[in-house]
Image (tube, rainbow, N blue to C red):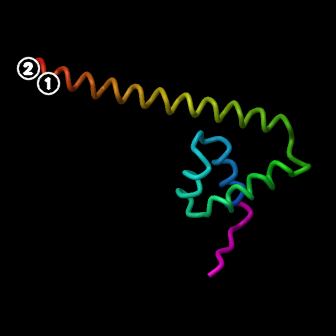
Amino acid sequence: MVTRFTDEFKAEAVRIALTSGLTRRQVANDLGVGFSTLSKWVQQDRNRPDKPAVQSDLEQELAELRRENRLLREERDILKKATQFFAERSK
């Protein structure tokens, strides 16, 4: 069975792949599409002649900020768990 995806779905998948900070494989699994399919969509998007270059700079900055945000959240969660661990241990 061949699944057809709308252009809007493809565009959103490409946006998520480029800006989420997740690997393409993770994004593909989350969206239920094949890794090679998502990679093809990303490549087609990059080769689009009407895509403004400024947008890609913004996408790169957004992806970097999202990665940093995710890292900071992970660090915060680790510190919360460590605090709980030592608080229980000191009782």
Label 2 to label 1, Cα distance in Å? Answer: 6 Å
- In this rendered view, identify the residue nearer to me: 55 or 28: 28
Q: Is the magenta stretch mostly helix, strand or loop?
A: loop
Query: Image quarter for residue 66?
Result: top right
- In this rendered view, identify the residue nearer to me: 36 or 66: 36
Look at 65% across and 48% down and name the residue there.
17
| Label 1, residues with CA under 10 Å away: few <14, some 14-19, many ≥20 | few
Residue located farthest toward the front when viewing the structure as drawn:
36
What residue did someone put label 1 on? 88
Look at 61% across and 29% down and name the residue there.
65
Where is residue 8 shown, x and y percent of the image? Answer: 71, 60
Specify start and end residues of the magenta stretch as a single range: 1-8
| Label 2, residues with CA under 10 Å away: few <14, some 14-19, many ≥20 | few
Element class at badge 1:
helix
Identify which amino acid the numbered label 1 is placed on.
Glu
Identify which amino acid the numbered label 2 is placed on.
Lys
Q: Report whether 24 appears left or right of 58.
A: left
Q: Was residue 10 drawn as part of the magenta stretch in this picture?
A: no
Q: Report whether 52 appears left or right of 67.
A: right
Proximity of marks 2 and 1: CB atoms separated by less than 8 Å? yes
Element class at badge 2:
loop
Where is residue 62 shown, x and y percent of the image? Answer: 66, 33
Query: Image quarter for residue 67?
Result: top right
Residue 91, numbered circle: 2
